[in-house]
Each structure stands twice: as structure tokens, then as C-alpha cells.
Amino acid sequence: MNGGPSGFHNAPVTRAFVIASALFTVFFGFQGRSSKLGLSYLDIFGKFRLWKLIVSIFAFSSTPELMFGLYLLYYFRVFERQIGSNKYSVFILFSVTVSLLFEILALAYLKDPAVNLVTSGPYGLIFASFVPFFFDIPVSTRFRVFGVRFSDKSFIYLAGLQLLLSSWKRSILPGVFGILCGSLYHLNVFHIRKAKITEDYALAI
């Protein structure tokens, strides 16, 4: 398993997302507000704090989550190199938007105003990326540790497991939604894998 050349060569979209995630996390961390960025029913349907929807896409709620999250985002730049920045941008938009929609629906269904049920951070994108990681990245090395078989992909799975369990139920929910989004993309729902961002739209942005 090889993520390709080091750095963000041929991965400008990943670089922009990693930088944005780090800046948002550090900014709210210095303000002591990072632990309050998670989504709750009251935020969305009571006080209409819609700004939290945007912030929750990028900012992690703790330093350990930031470290594991950025490591995984950085590794998954391999997919941008495989499919190109245009299609990878579509993958990001699809994963982030659909997972966020699932989170909002879950909040509406559970209707618990007392707690932040969903932790903050790009969990949708990260765990959606585990689907193509599972199907499209081959194992290159296998080894044993105390009789237990591992592969070079095991370290990525372990980092993902650590991130998934970092905030327990609050992080498991968006992680599961991310895997669901990745599965929908892999199944090519609505022919999403053929979608591209047009040049006119990109220039308008």
C-alpha cells in the first residue's frame, strides 16, 4: 500500500480541505469553543444556529480527533490522485452534503434538546473514504504480531477505529453515516461517479 509521493502533489483539493479543517479547529480551540461545536436538536430546530452546519463540516472538537482526522484526510489524498481533482471534489460534496442531511434527519427523529448528539468534524468525508479504501486499495504487505495477522492497511483501519470511538456515541453516528455515503457513491447512485463540476461553475466560484 502506497499513498504515492509525499506532500500534496496532484492533490490541491485535499490540501485546501486539510488546511481549512486545521484552521477552523485551531480558531475555535483558542476560543475554548471546540467542544461546543457538535450538533443538537436545539441548535438546528430550536435556535436555528445554521452556522454550526458549516463549522461542523471542518472543525474537530479535540486535539486527538484533529491529529487522527488530518492523518486520514492526508492519506486519502490518494483517491484525488486516482480520479482527479474534479471528480474528487464531487465525492467531497456528495459525502459532506448527504452525511450532513442524515445527521439532521437523525436529530429530527431523536428530538433530544439536552445534548449534542453529533460531534463536530469531517466525519462524513473521512469514513466515506473508507469504502473506496476497502474496495480499491490492494494489500501489499502481510505480517503477524503475536500470532495475529495484519496488513499494511491495518494501520489506517486502526486510525479510523480510534477516530470513530473518540467521542463514543457522538462520533459513531456521523462515522456510520459517512460509511453509508461512501457505499452510495460506490454503488453509483444517481450516476454520481460520472458527475463533474463544470468549468463555468468552477470559474463562478
Image: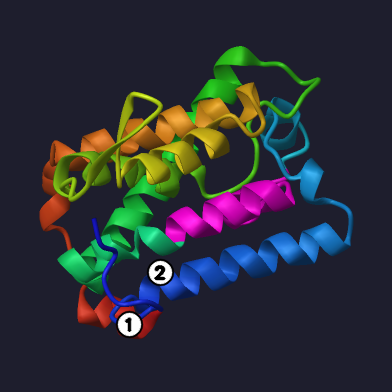
Q: Residue at x 64, y 28 (%)?
A: 170
Image spot of residue 147 (x, y percent): 34, 24
Image quadrant in which you'd find residue 156: top left
Which residue position holds label 1?
Answer: 9
Callout 1 secondary element: loop
Q: Is residue 108 magenta?
A: no
Q: Residue at x 60, y 24 (%)?
A: 107
Earlier sequence position, callout 1 versus callout 2: 1
Callout 2 secondary element: helix
Q: Which residues are magenta?
A: 49-73
Q: Is residue 77 above or below residue 202?
A: above
Q: Amino acid at mark 1?
A: His
Q: Residue at x 73, y 29 (%)?
A: 116
Q: Which mark is residue 14?
A: 2
Image quadrant in which you'd find residue 157: top left
Apparent side of residue 154 relative to residue 46 in the rendered image (left or right) = left
Apparent side of residue 134 relative to residue 62 in the rendered image (left or right) = left
Q: Is residue 98 visible?
A: no
The main secondary structure of the magenta stretch is: helix
Q: Quadrant of the N terminus?
A: bottom left
Q: Quadrant of the C terminus?
A: bottom left
Q: Is residue 53 visible?
A: yes
Image spot of residue 11 (x, y percent): 33, 75
Q: Residue at x 42, y 31 (%)?
A: 177
Apparent side of residue 152 relative to residue 17 in the rendered image (left or right) = left
